[in-house]
Amino acid sequence: MIVRLTTRSAAETMAAATAFGRTLKRGDCVALMGTLGAGKTQFVKGVCTSFEVHEPVASPTFVLMNRYSGSDDAGAELLVHHFDLYRVASEEELFDIGMPEFLTAGISLVEWADRFPSLLPARRYDVRMELGEEPQIRRIEIEPVGAVT
Ligand SMILES: Nc1ncnc2c1ncn2[C@@H]1O[C@H](COP(=O)(O)OP(=O)(O)OP(=O)(O)O)[C@@H](O)[C@H]1O
Ligand SMILES: [Mg+2]
């Protein structure tokens, strides 16, 4: 089932992402797509809140991936891997940092996921974000792909 929502502030996007994050399980991957400023990083922040990540969450700029320490429902440590593929030039760079292995461990959140679609796990959530007709409005679509539950 595709979930479609409209948010009217960054805080609303974060809150929606936190609610969505509570449905994620260890090993899940979220592929974020949408133009510059659409709110992908805000969404990532919201998901991180659901895993009680207390470190600052920001797009990885000079490294391709940030890793945050969070916790699951049972209080066990859960690593959150935050990728941003915007500046990545080749798939090879992603293999070099071990992206495929990270994608199956903990939770993975991938901004600009559509830049390297072949690296995405078959089971994942696609999150598409678009700018709305007014500056604060965003349209968000969340689609489970490959029978992720
Ligand atoms: N409804 C909204 N949801 C999310 N962000 C919003 C909303 N309204 C305004 N904003 C603002 O839009 C900006 C979104 O920035 P953000 O870094 O999350 O985008 P991004 O998609 O990650 O961009 P980039 O492609 O550069 O990584 C923030 O400055 C945020 O405050
Ligand atoms: Mg971003």
Image: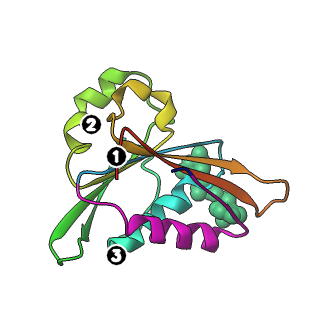
Amino acid type assigned to the residue bearing label 2 in the image? Met
Which residue reaches farthest left? 76
> Toward which corner of the image does residue 88 lie, by quadrant?
top left
Residue nearer the viewer, 140 or 54: 140
User: What residue is rendered at 50% in x and 65% in y?
Assistant: 17
Looking at the picture, how far across and down is residue 52, in whole percent?
A: 33, 76
Tell whether label 1 touches label 3 (CB within 8 Å): no
Query: As drawn, is 125 to the left or to the right of 133?
Result: left
Q: Is 105 above or below relative to 116? A: below
User: What residue is rendered at 17% in x and 69% in y?
Assistant: 77
Residue range in magenta is: 3-26
Inspect the magenta stretch and tell me whether residue 20 lies in it.
yes
Helix, strand or loop at label 2? It is: helix
The residue labelled by disc 3 is 54
The residue labelled by disc 1 is 65
Distance from Cα at disc 2 to Cα at disc 3: 23 Å
Tell whether label 2 touches label 1 (CB within 8 Å): yes
Question: For residue 99, which numbered disc appears in the image?
Answer: 2
How does the figure colour the protein chain or chains?
Answer: rainbow
Distance from Cα at disc 3 to Cα at disc 1: 17 Å
